[in-house]
Amino acid sequence: MRFRALVNARAVSLTTYFAILLFNVYTLSLYFNGQLTLYIHPRYVLFTVALNAVSLAACGVGFMLTAWRTVESPSGSDNTIADPGTASLAPWRPSLTVLVAVCVLLAAYVLPARTLSSETADQRSANFNSAQARPSAGGAGDTLTLFGADTTRLTVADWVMAFNARATPDSYVGKEADVVGFVFHPEDAPEAVFYVSRFSVTCCAVDARPLGLPVYSPGWQEEFGEDSWVRVTGAFTETEGDIPEPVIVAPESIELTEQPANPYVN
């Protein structure tokens, strides 16, 4: 009985080690393929890589030691003598948690890594253009100082921070924008309007918040699909009719572009 319990415990340990090793290898492969920033903020990349490297080494040693002990267990010892009733014991089966973890990791290996999309933005629309967004250029004060200089340097996140700091449409009319993002069309947006959007990430993709600038472009659906990455240049103008936004980008050009190496803004 004790021998069977020992074997089962070691089998659980081996399966757990294997699941952790799969996760470590997958995470490190994302780093070497330049895809880790699709899931976490760049500031945590080195920490994540170091943690997974240490875990890979430790779990690798643990896996080999446990496997060696399982193979080397003396089957002829007294501990191997089981009671007559133990013969009917069911063989060990991995726990549901371990099975789910392994299945998820195997699926992650098979499915390609991808950035968050307009579908995610729709699901998180309650946080769309939320005040917690952090622009890459600095705080709101740094962003607003650019209004007297070159506003084409502002990112989507910078503009959103400026919107939250200055609500008066007159502050934006005539200001030039030059931004890159993916095409997002919220369910309640007018047909002639789409948002050039990015996600703001504080820690990882779980806390990502969708941000976007409205662009007035009748017939955009004929040229660009949702989630297409575009570069939009143009100036802000006041809106009319059924457009809820106080100002909107009147584009001078909309061009398809490649997804940036770091698709999120921070």
Image (cartoon, rainbow, N blue to C red):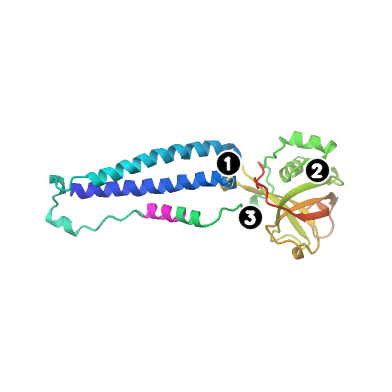
Tell me the residue at 25%/48% (across/down).
7
Residue type at mark 3: give it. Ser
Residue 165: percent from the left, percent from the top? 75, 40
Q: Earlier in the sequence, mark 3 or mark 1?
A: 3
The CA span between labels 3 and 1 is 18 Å
**Circles 1 and 2: CB distance less than 8 Å?**
no
Q: Residue at x 38, y 52 (%)?
A: 98
Q: Nearer the viewer, residue 19 or 244?
A: 19
Which amino acid is tagged 1?
Cys
Residue holding disc 1: 203
Q: Earlier in the sequence, mark 1 or mark 2?
A: 2
- The local secondary structure at tag 2 comes to helix
Residue of label 3: 117
Q: Which residues are magenta?
A: 96-104
Is residue 266 shown above or below 99? above
Estimate how packed mark 2 is, as few (under 14), some (14 to 19) or many (20 or more) residues with alpha carbons within 10 Å: some
**Dominant secondary structure of the magenta stretch?**
helix
Q: Which residue is mark 2?
A: 152
Decide if residue 20 is on the left or right side of residue 155. Answer: left
| Mark found first going from the N terminus, 2 or 3 | 3
